[in-house]
Amino acid sequence: MAGRFEPRPAVTRTTTRGGEVAVPVPAPRAVARPHGGRERRYVPPGPLDLGLVLGPLRRGPADPTFRTTPDGSVWRATRTPAGPGTLRVAARDGAVHAEAWGPGAEWLQEQLPALLGESDDPDAFEPRHRLVADTHRRRPGLRLTRTGLVMESLIPSILEQKVTTDEAYRAWRLLVRKYGEPAPGPSPHALGRGGTPTERMHVMPEPRTWALVPSWEWHRAGVDNKRASTILRAVRVARRMEEAAAMDPEAAQARLELIPGIGPWTSAETVQRSNGAPDAVTVGDLHLPGIVGYALAGDRDADDDAMLELLEPYAGQRHRAARLILLSGRTPARRKPKMPRHDIAAL
């Protein structure tokens, strides 16, 4: 989840961000763009903000699988059931123009409506607090994405367990660049960002490649044995994990939590993205209960039980309510020391 302010180091990315990525507004002049991929034009059923919808899929500003470009496009490199693929989407005149490359291009285009929140129902949400209602009114383009892909959200969520955001983002970046593969199709930096070259996008490694990462490479990436072991257990049953994308969110979470090391926090963070789960509120987070408690009741010391009680009026839509609270920017001033970094790579 993500807000509009710069993230603070935290146990997770959930409470420091509300799922929003700044998508550049293109200049009125025509912007050159690549061709040669599979194209599609999609008209969403209502207001759509690409930065809000796709923002939760980005794991840090240097995520090698996600990029925005000055022409107002969002680029995404991923591993689909048909193979690796690159997707570029841009909103123009009430429609979304998409282009995809690679073996997974057709799958990505078929899944485009779900990715952009077509299966989500924003009208089912009824604000119960003034703060939530105000944010809801100001963010009409918020829809919940549904990627239909589990492992691409599960692995980075495991990396984010009980470390700072910077540490988790660094681990994801290093491992994907080293063991992933270059994304198919053109490279986004070909469009230019002030003439500064950027690294090519990468698709995350396939399950077998994750299983073959040497222990010392996990160490160099700053990933402790507990998180590395959890990822290894998950990739060994990757096909069964991916099946969870077609389940209802509660059953999907139960499937993921069969893996030792995956608990309610990690499963919720995953199904929010893979299944577009509007009610999968994140519990077990360091900051989220205090943020929700402060925003709705002035209680910055709220725990998970208090948070769930405050969100009870939004049953069925608690994840959406939490995102709107984060996007409101109403968070208590920090009064605790920042979570210390533990650079195990330096040991």
Image (tube, grey):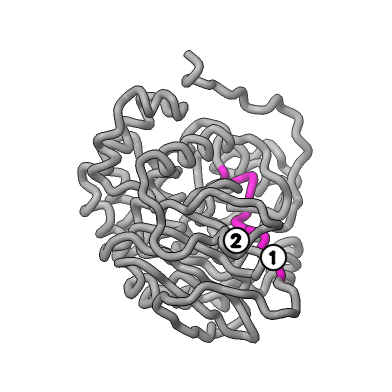
Q: Is residue 189 magenta?
A: no
Residue on which the image places disc 2? 68
Q: Residue furthest top?
A: 347
Instruction: Determine whether label 2 and label 1 are within 8 Å by CB.
Output: yes
**Mark 2 residue element:** strand
Q: Amino acid at mark 2?
A: Thr
How crowded is the residue under tag 2: few (<14 C-alpha within 10 Å), some, or many (20+)?
many
| Relative to 308, residue 38 above or below | below
Q: Looking at the image, which residue is at 62% across and 54% down?
A: 18
Q: Where is residue 300 drawn, in percent x and y?
A: 71, 39
Residue on which the image places disc 1? 24
Q: Looking at the image, which residue is at 21% across and 54% down?
A: 239
| Relative to 53, residue 231 above or below | above
Q: Is residue 18 magenta?
A: yes
How crowded is the residue under tag 1: few (<14 C-alpha within 10 Å), some, or many (20+)?
some
**Mark 1 residue element:** loop
Q: Amino acid at mark 1?
A: Pro
Q: Where is residue 125 drawn, in percent x and y?
A: 58, 72
Question: Is residue 136 shown left or right of residue 234?
Answer: right
Q: Nearer the viewer, residue 97 or 294?
A: 97
The quadrant in which residue 143 appears is: bottom right
**Which residues make up the magenta segment?**
13-25
Question: Is residue 234 shown left or right of residue 191?
Answer: left
Q: Where is residue 269 drawn, in percent x and y?
A: 46, 50
Q: Main secondary structure of the magenta part?
A: loop
